[in-house]
Image (tube, rainbow, N blue to C red):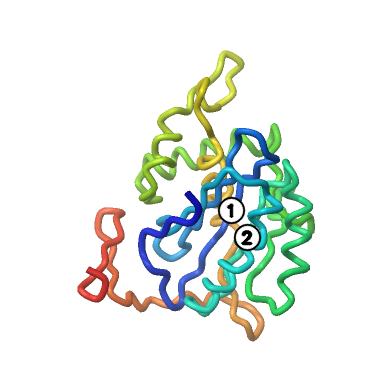
């Protein structure tokens, strides 16, 4: 598959886009599109392609999201498997500022968020356990709603290895889960910005949607 959309994007909706890249072989590139407003995942990209093939597709998709929402989406590639290079490439493609490029954040000893200026997300021995545990907590608490069946299946395939590392069981994949975990980390630090110089700009206009018990429903307009 490539792009799979579960509902329309809304005007005034801030979309966080996170990609787990593949260098080739049997791996997939996976991208999760997380709504900052509704805390659901209205779109997923999943395909057995390289990051270099995926980048121009995402560039056009990010432009389309901006046109539909009026809010610049933000994107982060995982920097492994060529993701760092592709972030640089996206930054060059984004000549008209249709979307924002994520720069890696970390907490200093005082708990303050520090921007490293490095494009993309670093999954390493320090960030991996934290991002996976926090995603697990968010999903189990029904804070985040996932429509994509394959993402849910990957979550159920996660185990704790003998070394204590959370990972996909033998024969299973984790690319969709890792992409969603990155998106959830971005949700905690990134906010929608006004073109005129910053500030929260997400609107409260439902445009035919309402949320009940953690699930986003379409009203008559999209039923």
Q: Residue at x 54, y 73 (%)?
A: 64
Circle 1 residue: 18
Does 114 appear above or below 171? Answer: below
Count the numbered circles shown: 2
Asked if residue 71 lies left or right of residue 77, the reply is left
Q: What crowding class fits label 1: few (fewer than 14 Cα within 10 Å), some (14-19), or many (20 or more)? A: many
Q: Taking 16 as reference, is 60 above or below it?
A: below
The location of residue 168, given as percent across then percent down, is 52, 27
Q: Is label 1 in a helix, a strand or a loop?
A: strand
The residue pinned by badge 2 equals 75
Instruction: Left or right? Give the position of 7 relative to 108.
Output: left
Give residue 187's position: percent from left, percent from top. Answer: 54, 57
Residue at left 46%, top 38%? 136
- Contact flag, marks 1 and 2 (Cβ < 8 Å): yes
SS label for mark 2: strand
Residue 112 x/y as whole percent: 69, 54
Give me the residue at 40% from left, 43% from top.
139
| Foreground residue among 197 and 101 | 101
- Of 43 and 27, which appears nearest the observer? 27
Side (left or right) of 63 relative to 118: left
Extreme residue toward the top, this view? 162
Please tell me in which quadrant of the rendered image residue 60 appears: bottom right
Q: Residue 23's spot in the image, x, y percent?
A: 70, 40
- Name the side, left or right, on which 42 lies relative to 119: left
Nearest the viewer among 65 and 131 is 65
- Quadrant occupied by the C terminus: bottom left
Furthest residue in direction bottom, as rendered? 196
Q: Nearer the viewer, residue 2 or 122?
A: 2
The first of marks 1 and 2 along the sequence is 1
Residue at mark 1 to residue at mark 2: CA–CA distance: 6 Å
- Residue located at (42% from left, 69% from top): 9
């Amino acid at each position: 598959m490539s792009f799979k959309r579960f509902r329309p994007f809304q005007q005034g909706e801030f979309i966080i886009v996170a990609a787990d890249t593949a260098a080739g072989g049997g791996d997939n590139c996976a991208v999760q599109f997380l709504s900052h407003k509704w805390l659901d995942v209205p779109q997923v990209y999943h395909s057995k392609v390289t990051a270099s093939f995926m980048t121009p597709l995402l560039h056009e998709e990010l432009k389309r999201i901006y046109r539909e929402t009026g809010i610049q989406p933000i994107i982060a590639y995982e920097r492994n498997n060529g993701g760092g290079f592709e972030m640089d490439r996206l930054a060059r493609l984004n000549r008209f500022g249709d979307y924002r490029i994520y720069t890696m954040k970390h907490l200093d000893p005082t708990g303050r968020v520090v921007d490293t200026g490095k494009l993309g997300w670093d999954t390493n021995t320090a960030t991996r356990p934290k991002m996976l545990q926090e995603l697990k907590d968010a999903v189990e608490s029904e804070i985040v709603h996932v429509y994509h069946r394959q993402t849910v299946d990957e979550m159920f395939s996660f185990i704790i290895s003998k070394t204590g590392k959370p990972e996909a069981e033998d024969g299973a994949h984790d690319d969709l889960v890792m992409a969603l975990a990155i998106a959830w980390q971005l949700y905690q630090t990134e906010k929608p910005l006004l073109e005129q110089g910053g500030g929260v700009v997400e609107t409260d206009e439902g445009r035919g949607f309402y949320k009940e018990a953690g699930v986003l429903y379409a009203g008559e307009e999209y039923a």
